[in-house]
Amino acid sequence: MTALFRLLSHWPLVALHALGWLLGWVAFLASGVYRRRFLANARLAGVTWSGWSRAVGESGRLVAELPRLWLGKPVAVRWNGVALIEEALQQRRGIIFLTPHLGCFEVTAQAYAERFAASGQPITVLFRPPRKAWLRQVVAASRQRPGLATAPTTLAGVKQLIKALKAGQVVGLLPDQVPPEGLGVWAPFFGQPAYTMTLSARLAQQTGATVLLAWGERLGWGRGYTVHIRPLTETLSDDKGIAATQINGAMEQLIQQQPGQYLWGYARYKQPRKEES
């Protein structure tokens, strides 16, 4: 599989996206469990056929583009709202990027590191290592690049994020990722109770960092991506349940702007897993 990843990393983005579109529809049609979850999640959000049908192919593109993003040549990236980053960096209070499972969330951290890390403001992203050994090796090699560090979803990883923020650096999280049991609260997401992490709000409250919303829009015909940056318009509550609801609401607003690129097949409403000891 590693050899296949390296081979695909040389493909042009337009070819990978074409392959991904096909894979997305094959997975959707072949798996009844995935298809029912996909459609149920989309209906909860009021997404129409035009939105969810596009998201089927986009979900496949999310997977197919990874070899190029991890191992291949840099891709074209445009920015929308970059002034918000520049202003926050000048304040030197740290930045917390909140990115839902929307578009290409892999490219947002890479694009930030490429543009801003040279000025002494690296980014650390929280991620859950893959279970498969070969994929762990590929991910570890691809994400260890200048200006981009990773933190595991453990207590040590959380301490790493806090340390980075207190040094005025930048961190990135996926707040719509289901956390382990005991590390979240139940909060509404498109009207349905979803187990939601409290870490993003706690980090902001403990460090005083600026919270920005970010997502990477996948452009058509292999033209690359646009990274969109938006402010969090509400002050996060000290109550963890209210803060989780506020963050979920902010994620909903981003998703509603481009429902055709959200990962509707993600098991957002599942029960949390027990934290590994």
Image: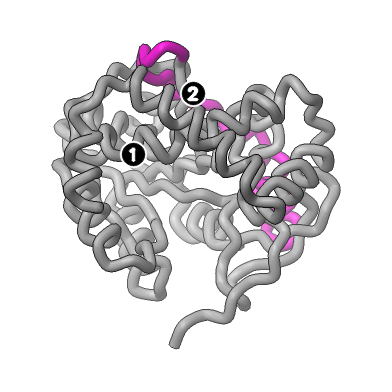
- Residue kind at label 1, given as amino acid type: Leu
Please state which of residues 174 and 220 is positioned toward the viewer in this rendering.
220
Q: Secondary structure at mark 1?
A: helix
Query: Residue 66: which numbered mark, if any?
Result: 1
- Residue kind at label 2, given as amino acid type: Glu
Q: According to the image, label 2 marks what residue?
A: 217
- In the rendered image, residue 58, in percent from the top left (x then y), is placed at 54, 30
Determine which quarter of the picture holds residue 262.
top right
**Residue drawn at (57%, 81%), measured in percent from left and top?**
274
Magenta residue check for 237: yes
Looking at the image, residue 83 lies above or below residue 119 = above
**Crowd band around label 2 with a 10 angstrom C-alpha radius: few (<14), some (14–19), many (20+):** many
Looking at the image, residue 101 lies above or below residue 20 = below
**Residue drawn at (23%, 44%), measured in percent from left and top?**
4
Horizontal side, residue 167 vs residue 236: left or right: left
The residue segment tinted magenta is 220-249
**Residue drawn at (49%, 58%), measured in percent from left and top?**
203
| C-alpha span from label 2 to label 1 | 15 Å
Image quarter where the C terminus lies is bottom left
Horizontal side, residue 117 vs residue 256: left or right: left
Please state which of residues 219 and 7 is positioned toward the viewer in this rendering.
7
